Image (cartoon, helix red, strand yellow):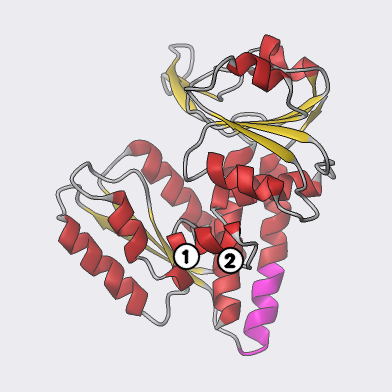
Amino acid sequence: MQLINGKETSEIIKQEIAEEVKALVAKGGKQPHLAAVLVGNDGASQTYVNAKVKACEKVGFTSTLITLEDTISEEELLRQIDALNKDADIDGFIVQLPLPKHISEQKVTEAIDPEKDVDGFHPTNIGRMVLDIPSFLPATPYGIMQLLERYNIETEGKHCVVIGRSHIVGRPMSILLSRNTKVGNCTVTLTHSRTKDLKAEALRADILVVALGRAEFVTADMVKEGAVVIDVGITRVPDESKKRGFALKGDVKFDEVAPKCSYITPVPGGVGPMTIVSLLKNTLLAAEKK
């Protein structure tokens, strides 16, 4: 069993991005500028956005963090997005999800200029991805594709099973792995909560991508010997033995599943760091386009 170390890989990619930024600026290009909008004070979202800001500093990006009260109206938030769309200095921006219930995530996503949509969620970018046209890819699936590539994991002709059909991870992952590309050419089965005999489907997987958000859902009896397991989930589980009072668990019961795998991502330190790096890569691409 080999551990897929997303933390280590992300640091290597950050160094590569930093070199590209230096070269871009040396040629007279502008310093890439990423903005993040955080609505409310959700602890996990704040931690994630702060990590993005730190990553920007590390690679030589300019970063802007806009914090808004969770009482902000949908109309006011849309005005803020419009201002970011029109700000020529900002190459890309994200609106951190989830949003308060009175705000439509779909309206917010569609309001973002596709040319600045570095999270890769706008329908234009999703459509371009489906048609295999260069676009900003959704950050988490993009991060997973980079891990598979950098660990030289063979995907061609393999059977990949994706558990979870979210617009953010599951569906884009199924599309990317089925594309006719270097990391791709899989036969993909997309499963979800209504799938009959999910265990049998999972056992067929050469590559199993789990993105459910249910702690330790996948157990050893659901994974075949030698499978590659990508665990996207991260859930806070109460744990009095920890200083913080909780432990971070993935969607896979790591201790019992890992011995059966050829490769597996840990939680934390697997997919998470790669999501942030993918956001940086999309922002660099946006800046280079200018």
Dot 1 amino acid type? Thr
Residue reaching furthest to the front? 196
Q: Are marks 2 and 1 in contact (CB under 8 Å)?
A: yes
Q: Would residue 58 be visible to someone looking at this image? A: no
| Quarter of the picture holding the C terminus | bottom right
Q: Is residue 212 visible?
A: yes
Q: Nearer the viewer, residue 132 or 72?
A: 132
| Amino acid marked by disc 2 | Ser
Residue at disc 1, secondary structure: helix
Looking at the image, is 89 positioned above or below residue 188?
below
Residue at coordinates 48% horizontally, 23% vertically from top-left? 193
Residue 275: x, y in percent? 57, 48
Q: Quadrant of residue 227?
A: top right
Q: Quadrant of residue 237?
A: top left
Give the overall secondary structure of the magenta segment: helix
Residue 243 in percent (x, y) is at 45, 20
The residues colored magenta run 18-28
> Viewer-proximal residue, 112 or 234?
112
Question: Which one is nearer the viewer's eye here, 278 or 156?
Answer: 156
**Residue pictured at 19% horizontal, 51% vertical:** 69
Q: Which residue is mark 1?
A: 124
The percent position of residue 167, horizontal first and vertical second, equals 47, 45
> Residue 197 magenta-drawn?
no
Q: Mark 1: few, some, or many residues within 10 Å (few <14, many ≥20)?
A: some
Toward the bottom, the furthest residue is 28
Residue position for label 2:
135
Residue 63 shown left or right of residue 129 in the figure: left
